[in-house]
Image (spheres, coloured by chain):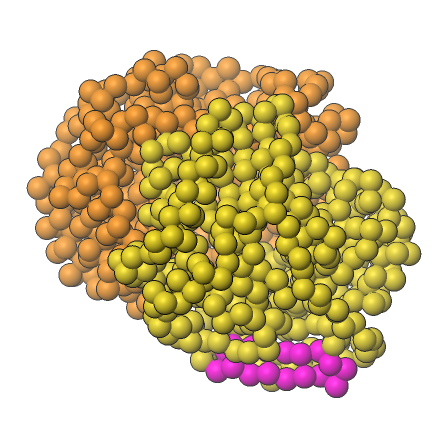
Chain colours: A orange, B yellow
Amino acid sequence: MTSPILSHTFPNGLVLVAQPMQWLQSAAFSFLVPAGCIHEPAARSGLSSLVCEMTLRGAGPRDNRQFVVDLDNLGVEHHAAVSAARMSYGGATLAENLPAALAIFADVLQRPRLPEEELEACRQTTLQNLRAVEDEPSEKAMIELRRRFYPDPWGRSSLGEQAALEAAGLDEIRAFVSRQFRPQGTILGVAGRVEWEPLKDLVGRLFGGWQPGDDATFEEHAAPGGYLHLPYDSAQTHIGIAYASVPYRHEDYFRAWGAAGALGGGMSSRLFTEVRERRGLCYSVYASYHTLLDRAGVFCYAGSSAQRAQETLDVTLGELVRLARGIESGELDRLKARIKTELVMQQESGFSRASSIAREWYHISRARALEELQGIIDGLTCDDINNYLAANPPGDFTIVTVGPEALRT
Amino acid sequence: MEFLTHTLPNGLEIVAECAPEAYSTALGFIVKTGSRDETDEVAGVSHFLEHMAFKGTATRSADDVNRELDEIGSHGNAATSEETTVFYAPVLPEYQSRATEILADILRPSLREADFETEKKVIVEEIQMYEDQPPFGADEKCRAAFFGDHPLGRSVLGTVASIEALPVSAMRDYFRRRYAPGNIVLAAAGRVDFDRLVADCQRACGAWETVDCRRVVEPPRPRSGFQRLTRESAVQQYILQMSPGPTSDDEDRYAAKVLAVILGDDSGSRLYWDLVDPGIAEVADLGHIEYLGAGAFITQIACAPEDAEEVYQRAMQVYRTAHDEGITPAELQQAKNKVRSQLVLSSERPARRMFNVGGDWVYRREYRSLQNDLDLIASIGLDEVTEVLNRYSLLDGTALSIGP
């Protein structure tokens, strides 16, 4: 039992993509707004996070407190986040409360109050988040790795910088919102117990009057790459390694993704087996695929006590290089089994489907049904993946370490 | 939705909430053992043993275990707490039998010495990983201070020294005493073929020998006090506080959870409005945790070091006001709406139901459907919440602050 995916593009450019899942009691939504940190002025790193925080401090008829109280009373589990390209607002609640929840977020996107009296509190909140990451060396390593791997502004961290956050003013926040919060480029994914036609009408009513704006442009600067060590007083050395791969919309995507899965996904993956199980070098070691619209990378992490970190780095790099020689059919079969399970289990969660279909629309301007994705995965062969790997061997690694001592690369 | 149980002749219990329309099946073997069942000589052995279960059995190598769990697409894992060690696997229904067989098999690990020595290093890495992460081990230290020499004060991870000194013979002995069939519950939820589950479990576990592993549960004598620990490299200050709360079989534990939402949920609560919304604290939460014969409210705070004193005092003032003036009907309704929605959303995953059904059985030998829980939450009135506030003081606890 699965269900089709329906979509509609409104005249102002807003895309609604939905999967009715009548077997659930809940419904979920995921808004992707083209207001990521790549759109921040260079001297205002973190502005997008400040904006995100401010948009949640009252919108339309609701002040800050009423906004939270109303969402709580509707039982909406919600969250907001900023990535390179997008600001996302997601939530899930009992199906009968979805229309009221969408109406509240229609205000957030079109009529945020951005109240002056909340600015200092929001600034403090973003500064707290920035400080908190200083106490998480593993996260620090991965943030710095993205910064060095992708060309600026794509590698930016939305957490921002202290001086920029302290200097940002209300006029800049308001300007960012009026420039970036616009219907064209905004995608709303909905999944769960919903009826398509009433949903489409509702979204049309809530967002029909939203006026399109201009598309943003920005300059790119080359990625630094190479090796960076950040001295840190920690028990472990936290190692991040990245190499280039193909983005989601590329025809080789599933081959590249399959190779990364064999490398670092699951308990029988190469990194888990060689770094943790055989040698006991790590507790946490993994590789994950990260894709932007037109570039992507495989990001590996390993955390090892300082005196064993050099061996961990050497073994991990060895596995990355060895991957180019190809994977075996057993590795692919296990990957397929894990993905099949994941895809089926997505149907148990409206939120998981809503965010997946919205993300997919962002990348390829459509959303595939689970059967279609399953078909693509079923069709993957070892030869496909190995030919891809032979033509695109992992290399030119960007490396960041955070810990007591630098390593030899 | 049907709830079924079966007990094997050797005492192993099987409980399942069967939902034929579900997409997946969740299985979990819950072993009633954890750090509270340890002594100083074997500190950390429960958690270490959980790791060793994945290192091979009489018929499987460590690679086989990992490979076969991946072959059935399982994002399975294991977790050790003060009171239980759980091995679980959410899988597609077609893999129910294989998942049962693999999980049962790893509950009879070989505990080979070479694997033991390799895995020791992984445990040491895990301990060091937590030392680098907020709150830098302060959660275990706070629990130790709160429970004093009561077994619930013991560390789950152990220390680098206790793990390095642990001989494999001590683990084998602990295993024999604690992993007996009468001390294990197999819980399942989702699309479960119960007859097959029983048959598979009988085949895999039927020959396990019965051992008496009753646990003596003494009531703790919680302590109060305030400790400061220095971690110079930290940027934020982290404060934890534990104070007594309802135990796992107290009727008022639901009212306690609603109270924790009202006072300290991460959004819309009194601590939120007082400390998080104005940006004074990064985190200010209140939660309730229940054990066999013990319970606690836990406050967690993270903020800038220079604000720590003020933030802590303001949190205590929030509690004082609640004790003095109670809560309002609007707050209660808001919290109940929120909890109701959370329960429904989380229960859509069989994996979550498995943990709930298994936990209810292990702790109280009872079955509670989602509807039972929703009805109970709906029935909570101001009186019940006030009663919790009267019975347990949120101010009288053990606090620990760590940071620069």
Residue at position x 88%, y 56% in the image:
B170
A361 or B199, which is in the foreground? B199
Q: How far from the left and from the top, in percent, is residue B228?
A: 62, 33
- Classify the position of the N terminus of chain A by image quarter: bottom left
Residue A133 lies, with reference to residue A263, above or below; the image says above
Q: How far from the left and from the top, in percent, is residue B401?
A: 58, 35
The magenta segment? B2-18
Q: How far from the left and from the top, in percent, is residue B168?
A: 88, 53
Viewer can see residue A348: no
Specify whether B101 is left or right of B339: right
Residue A278 lies, with reference to residue B380, above or below; the image says above
Viewer can see residue B13: yes
Q: Chief secondary structure of the magenta span?
A: strand
B194 or B336, which is in the foreground? B336
Specify whether A5 is left or right of B173: left
Q: How far from the left and from the top, in percent, is residue B133?
A: 60, 35
Residue at position x 56%, y 71% in the image:
B249
Q: How many marks?
A: 0
Q: Residue furthest front?
A: B324
Specify whether B41 is left or right of B139: right
Q: Is residue B205 magenta?
A: no
The quarter of the picture where residue A98 lies is bottom left
A44 or B304, which is in the foreground? B304
Q: Residue furthest left?
A: A209
Q: Is residue B6 magenta?
A: yes
Residue at position x 28%, y 60% in the image:
B329
Residue at position x 86%, y 51% in the image:
B41
Specify whether A1 is left or right of B118: left
- Classify the position of the C terminus of chain A by image quarter: top right
Residue B85 lies, with reference to residue A214, above or below; the image says below
The quarter of the picture where residue B137 lies is top right
